[in-house]
Image (cartoon, helix red, strand yellow):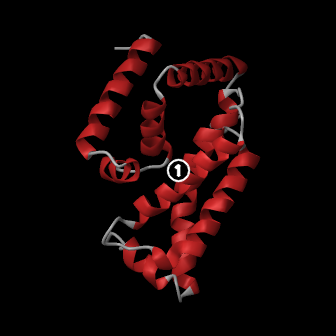
Amino acid sequence: MEEKDWNVIAKEALHNDVAFDELYEHFFPRIYNLIYARVKNAATADDIVSDVFEKMVTHLDSFDSTKASFITWLSRIATRTLTDYYRWQSHRQNVEWDDVFSPKVDEKEGPDGQLLEQEGKKELLLALGKLSEREQQIIELKFWGDMSNKEIAETLNISPANVGVILFRAMGTMREILGRD
């Protein structure tokens, strides 16, 4: 399967609704997951993601593929929009893991299995909470934002090697916290 050139599609989206729809459909889940992982509330995530894509539409004519890839550009808009949200918000909400991730449990699975799954999610959330803000952000971009180390590096203005080191150390710290080899 041939990889699409999202930089070209982004430029086409200025005057082509089909290209715009393709951009939106492809990047919406990535940006939504990224935002949702940080705010841990569906309604808030919906509002912030709406702001991100509104800013994308407003500033799409200023996108320059010689400075950054489209995903990097859009991720920067998302992280800045999140920063604005946290400036406006005086405190972070204390929520359960289910509010963050809420995967569906197979109805055939018994109550014991559901309880074990919920306990595992709580442990993971607690372990994530013990990492530094930078480590949490990189893990969220990597796993919820489905970004490569290079894309994360461009978004955070650090080197890809630094992303790899931080990610490696953060995952090791989480394994230690969770008591796993």
Name the residue nearer the viewer: 7 or 106.
7
Residue 105 in sight here: no
Residue 89 in sight here: yes
Quadrant (top left/top right/bottom left/bottom right) for the N terminus = bottom left
Asked whether, in this view, residue 72 is left or right of residue 107, the answer is left
Q: Please, what is the three-letter code of the amino acid marked with disc 1?
A: Thr
Total numbered labels: 1
Q: Label 1 belongs to which residue? A: 79
Asked whether, in this view, residue 34 is left or right of residue 45, the answer is left
Q: Quadrant of residue 17?
A: bottom right
Identify the element where label 1 is drawn. helix
Q: Position of residue 128 (x, y in %)?
A: 51, 25
Please tell me which residue is depicted at 45% across the width and 42% down the height of the picture. Answer: 143
Q: Position of residue 74 (x, y in %)?
A: 49, 62
Please tell me which residue is depicted at 57% across the width and 19% down the height of the picture. Answer: 126
Q: Position of residue 19 (x, y in %)?
A: 51, 81
Q: Position of residue 164 (x, y in %)?
A: 28, 37
Name the residue nearer the viewer: 143 or 13.
13
173 shown above or below 75: above
Please tell me which residue is depicted at 65% across the width and 40% down the height of the picture. Answer: 39
Extreme-top residue of the structure? 179
Please tell me which residue is depicted at 54% across the width and 88% down the height of the picture. Answer: 16
Extreme-right residue of the structure? 43
41 shown above or below 117: below
Quadrant (top left/top right/bottom left/bottom right) for the C terminus = top left
Q: Count residues near mark 1 (Cα–Cα under 10 Å), then give few for <14, some for 14-19, many for 20+.
A: some
Extreme-bottom residue of the structure? 15
